[in-house]
Image (cartoon, grey):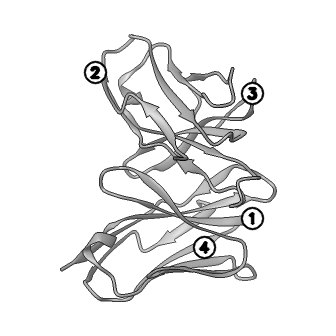
Amino acid sequence: KNEVEQSPQNLTAQEGEFITINCSYSVGISALHWLQQHPGGGIVSLFMLSSGKKKHGRLIATINIQEKHSSLHITASHPRDSAVYICAANMDSNYQLIWGAGTKLIIKP
Amino acid sequence: EAQVTQNPRYLITVTGKKLTVTCSQNMNHEYMSWYRQDPGLGLRQIYYSMNVEVTDKGDVPEGYKVSRKEKRNFPLILESPSPNQTSLYFCASSSPTSGRGKTQYFGPGTRLLVL
């Protein structure tokens, strides 16, 4: 069993829908990262969370340390949001990342 | 502009012909890492380096070598490439003093095809 689990694996939605991607982890972590990989391959860091909630534009990331769970939300989704979203966990006091398998999101116009 | 650069971006080679993929960062980061990404397997770490002259194996180090002679550079060396090393490779760097904790900054990726 992977220590970082993402769901769903694939998600297709219509433009404008509210999107939620989930990430659960089973190890003690110091931070949880959300990253975005566009079809061209490039990877961009979206958020790094150790507690609570962060917002950047239409993206919101939350983490519940007690439940070992994080969510990435996209409000008013747009076709340009189509990408693979990956969560990754920093183990306690460690640079190493444990990677989720990614969620492929397609937003249809 | 703060960035991680990789070269080449695309490479086709033949089995057994040594190759090097370069990685360079201009953010004075201590930590650098190489990943490979394969369909259905996600990102897997090959090697990482905590600082100059300090390198360590990741999850899939077989068939690869690295060096860290300078802080900014972390080349990935395939001494004798094989077809199972066909993959998309990413270099990343990070620093605890970057102001964003241990956020990793990724290079653009190198697509390697070994025939």
Residue A19: x %, y % from top left = 40, 83
Residue tagged by mark 2? B115
User: In 3D space, how far apart are the residues under numbered discs 3 and 4 (Cα atoms)?
Assistant: 34 Å
Residue tagged by mark 3? B52
User: In 3D space, how far apart are the residues under numbered discs 4 and 1 (Cα atoms)?
Assistant: 11 Å
Front position among marks 3 and 1: 3
Label 3 close to label 4 by CB (< 8 Å)? no
User: In 3D space, how far apart are the residues under numbered discs 3 and 2 (Cα atoms)?
Assistant: 33 Å
Is residue A67 visible in this depiction of the protein? yes
- Of the residues under marks 4 and 1, which one precedes in the sequence? 4
Residue tagged by mark 1? A29
Front position among marks 4 and 1: 1
Q: Are marks 2 and 4 on the same chain?
A: no
Mark 2 element type: loop
- Looking at the image, residue A109 sits to the left or right of residue A47; the answer is left
Q: Quadrant of the C terminus of chain B?
A: top left
In this rendering, the answer to whether B63 lies above or below A109 is: above
Mark 4 element type: strand
Mark 3 element type: loop
Q: Chain of mark 2?
A: B
- Structural crowding at the residue carrying mark 1, measured as other residues with C-alpha within 10 Å and reported as few (<14), some (14–19) or many (≥20): some
Which amino acid type corresponds to the residue marked 4 in the rendered image?
A: Ser
Label 4 close to label 1 by CB (< 8 Å)? no
Which amino acid type corresponds to the residue marked 3 in the rendered image?
A: Val
Q: Chain of mark 4?
A: A
**Can you tell which quarter of the image residue A104 is in?**
bottom left
Residue A103: x %, y % from top left = 41, 67
- What's the mark number on residue A24? 4
Q: Nearer the viewer, residue A11 or A108?
A: A108
Front position among marks 3 and 4: 3
Q: Chain of mark 3?
A: B
Is residue B63 visible in this depiction of the protein? no
